[in-house]
Image (spheres, helix red, strand yellow):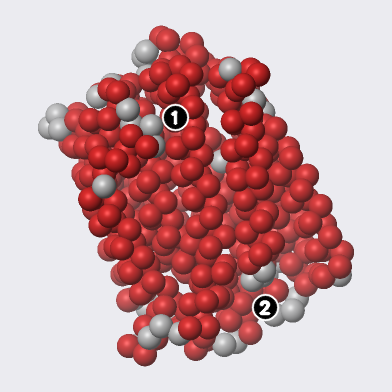
Amino acid sequence: MANISSDELGTEPIGKLLVKQALPASIGILVMSLNIVVDTVFVGHWIGSIAIAAINVVLPVSFFIAALGMAIGIGGSSIISRSLGKGNKEKALNTFGNQIILTLLHTVALVIPGLVFANSIIPGFGGKGDIFEPARIYYTIVLYGVPFLALCMMGNTVIRAEGKPKFAMTAMIIPSVSNLILDYVFIKILGYGMHGAAWATTISYLLCLIYVSWFFLSHNSELKLTAGNFALSRPIVAEIGALGFVTLARQAVVSVTYLVMNNILFNLGGELSVTVYAIVARMLMFASFPILGVTQGFLPIAGYNYGANKFERVIKSINTAIKYSVLVATVVFLIIMLFPGEIASVFTSDELVIKETPNAMRWVFGAIPIISIQLIGAAYFQAVGKATPALLLTLTRQGFFFIPLVFILPRFYGELGVWMSFPVSDVLSTIVTGYFLNKEVRLKLK
């Protein structure tokens, strides 16, 4: 798990390099996912099952705003990786400076109206009935910390683009561990309830930003900024926007998915169904960590070697990333299929929730072994700077297939139709992405 210099992205053996990049990313995502899961467990047992639903309502709003940072980060990091591959360090520096300014401007501009219109936004995302008040408390406090999170997510992708995956992993671990510690102190010991859960999250975001800032100000980073690097450049901003929009669109669709799911499930089964979905969604985030880790490790490798015109290495990185992620996804699939009831009981002692969750969980994870093909395929086009196919393929899974299906299938199958929409959309999007990725490899890289 040693850190590497950026030029080694073009020389190290692909398998070894992917492990170096993906393992720290996977560990970081694992810890972050564990934080979300354990945080949900704490809230469920120490506050109540309604609190789980309340947090699930708030997440898509706060994560969408924070995802601006990730979008700007990934868009800019693609430029940085390719620029370092071409030996153009000045462009890499200017891109990073522009990323910082864009992240600050956009997130603050969204947080302010987000706070002003909180009472309208929360019910729109499913925070109705008994869910509204705890959701309002959590939402208001967490939104103050969202700009910190956005800067962390942006900085993390840049650290990875430099070939420093171990530091990127640490940046993900710090807020996760601190959030759990603060959860225990604020909720269990001090009894602050939803206020405590929210402040624990916000403070953990701030601690992460302090670490990321230290990395770039210390000798560990190759990107030493000067005042001139912060001047916004129209071509760089346009390129960051085009590539970053792919990530932003993905998160926007995720947020819309939460909105649609919370409202449809509330209408079909009330607070119970929303709580079941909250648990399933947490497990989906947690169980996807190795696939997402491989995807994150793959991005700088593909981008750097594409920029250096080493297309055989790009092809090998695609094949290796898919092979590794399919393998780990299959292990996840087997665990979920065999122990869904036991998993549900970890989150809550509510017998009705435990009874209803396993069937939903099995359907949601039904096609998880193949979804890595879709994720790697979409990530490839983003890594090499092809914004349009990256955007379209990113949207296939949830935008083009899942959201329409979740409106159609419940008409015939009721609540079961909601859960069926997951594997059907996964299969369809994987077929589409696989076709275009194979075509790209045959016609462009070979």
Question: Which residue corresponds to the image point at 67% horizontal and 69% vertical from the top-left?
Answer: 386
The answer to the question of whether label 1 and label 2 lie on touching residues, with beta carbons closer than 8 A, is: no
Q: Up-down: is 75 above or below 427?
A: below
Q: Neighbour class for label 2 at 10 Å: few (<14), some, many (≥20)?
A: many
Query: With 193 as the anchor, is 82 left or right in this view?
Result: right
The numbered dot on residue 112 is: none
Toward which corner of the image does residue 17 lie, by quadrant? bottom right
In this rendered view, identify the residue nearer to me: 219 or 422: 422
Query: With 178 as the anchor, is 90 left or right in this view?
Result: right
What residue would you read off at disc 1? 263
Q: Neighbour class for label 1 at 10 Å: few (<14), some, many (≥20)?
A: many
What residue would you read off at disc 2? 307
SS for callout 1: helix
Query: With 166 as the anchor, is 332 left or right in this view?
Result: right
In this rendered view, identify the residue nearer to me: 411 or 140: 411
- In the rendered structure, which disc, 1 or 2, sits on the residue that comes first in sequence? 1
In this rendered view, identify the residue nearer to me: 411 or 75: 411
State the image coordinates of residue 125 (x, y, percent, origin top left): 39, 37
State the image coordinates of residue 147 (x, y, percent, origin top left): 31, 59
Is label 1 or label 2 in front?
1
**Alpha-carbon span between mark 1 and mark 2:** 45 Å
Amino acid tagged 2: Gly
SS for callout 2: helix
State the image coordinates of residue 180 (x, y, percent, origin top left): 30, 39
Q: In which quarter of the image is the C terminus?
A: bottom right
Amino acid tagged 1: Asn
Q: Up-down: is 366 above or below 298?
A: above
Residue 77 in view (yes/no): no
Residue 269 in view (yes/no): yes
